[in-house]
C-alpha cells in the first residue's frame, strides 16, 4: 500500500472535526496548522493532492450530512477519517449524547459504497481533568466501532488513542493535548508521524 498510496497523482481528503480543521477555513492554502499541514510539509513536492475538510465541532452525523459536497465532490482516491470525540464530549457538556449504535450507523453511512482507499483514525482522549476519566465509558465503545469497521472495510487503522496514551505516559498528557482533546503543536507532529508511519508500513 505504501508508496502507491501516496502517489502524487492521487487525492487524499482528510475529514473530521476540530482536530483536523485547525483553522483551515482561514488559511489561504486551506490546510490549517495541524497534522494535515504537517503531512503536507513532510511529504514534500512529490506529495498527493491533500484536501482538508475538517469542521470544528462536528460529530459523525454532521460529517454524514456534508459527505457528498465536502468529500465525494473531490473524487478522492484516499479518504482519512478522524471523528468521534465530539460524539462523546456533547454527552458531558451539553447533555446531548450519541449512542454507540447511532455513531456506528453514521460511520457506516460514510463508508458504504465509497470508491476510495480508507484510513480510519481512532478518536482519542488524554484525560487531563478528573471528570474526563469518566468519558472513557462513552468513548471506548466508539473506538471499538472504528476498529471493527477498519477491519470490515479493509481500511488502514491509525491507533491514535493507543499511541497518544502510550506517549503521554512518558512526556505527560498536556504536552500532547493541553485540554485532553485538542493536540498541541507537539501532539499534531506526533499524529502526523503516526499517520505517515501507518500508511507506509
Image: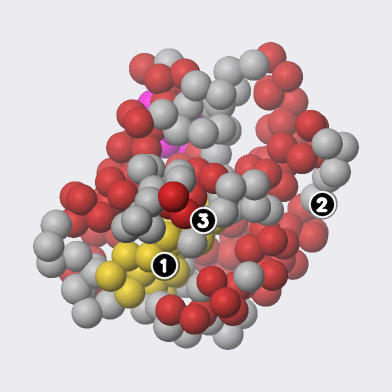
Residue 116 seen in this snapshot: no
2 or 1: tag closer to the N-terminus: 1
The answer to whether 145 appears left or right of 196 in the picture is right
The span shown in magenta is: 162-167
Badge number at residue 13: 1
Circle 2 crowding by C-alpha within 10 Å: few under 14, some 14–19, many from 20: some
1 or 3: tag closer to the N-terminus: 1
**Whether residue 136 is situated above or below residue 58 in the rendered picture:** above
Q: Secondary structure under badge 2?
A: loop
Query: Residue 164: within the magenta?
Result: yes
Residue at mark 3 to residue at mark 2: CA–CA distance: 22 Å
Q: Which residue ends up furthest to the right in the rendered image?
A: 95
Q: How many marks?
A: 3
Q: Where is the C terminus found, in terms of image quarters?
A: bottom left
Badge number at residue 99: 2
Foreground disc of the pair 2, 1: 1
The answer to whether 40 appears left or right of 32 in the picture is left
Amino acid at each position: 500500500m505504501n508508496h502507491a498510496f501516496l502517489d502524487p497523482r492521487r487525492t487524499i481528503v482528510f475529514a473530521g472535526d476540530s482536530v483536523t480543521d485547525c483553522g483551515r477555513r482561514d488559511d489561504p492554502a486551506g490546510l490549517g496548522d495541524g497534522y494535515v499541514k504537517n503531512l503536507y510539509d513532510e511529504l514534500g513536492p512529490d506529495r498527493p493532492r491533500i484536501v482538508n475538510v475538517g469542521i470544528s465541532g462536528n460529530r459523525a452525523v454532521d460529517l454524514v450530512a456534508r459527505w457528498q459536497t465536502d468529500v465525494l465532490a473531490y473524487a478522492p482516491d484516499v479518504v482519512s477519517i478522524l471523528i468521534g470525540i465530539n460524539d462523546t464530549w456533547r454527552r458531558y457538556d451539553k447533555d446531548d449524547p450519541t449512542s454507540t449504535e447511532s455513531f456506528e450507523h453514521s460511520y457506516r453511512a460514510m463508508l458504504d459504497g465509497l470508491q476510495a482507499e480508507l484510513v480510519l483514525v481512532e478518536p482519542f482522549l488524554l484525560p487531563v481533568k478528573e471528570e474526563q476519566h469518566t468519558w472513557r465509558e462513552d468513548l471506548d465503545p466508539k473506538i471499538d466501532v472504528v476498529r471493527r469497521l477498519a477491519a470490515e472495510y479493509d481500511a488502514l487503522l491509525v491507533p491514535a488513542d493507543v499511541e497518544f496514551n502510550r506517549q503521554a505516559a512518558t512526556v505527560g498528557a498536556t504536552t500532547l493535548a493541553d485540554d485532553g482533546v485538542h493536540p498541541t503543536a507537539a501532539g499534531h507532529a506526533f499524529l502526523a508521524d503516526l499517520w505517515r508511519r501507518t500508511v507506509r508500513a
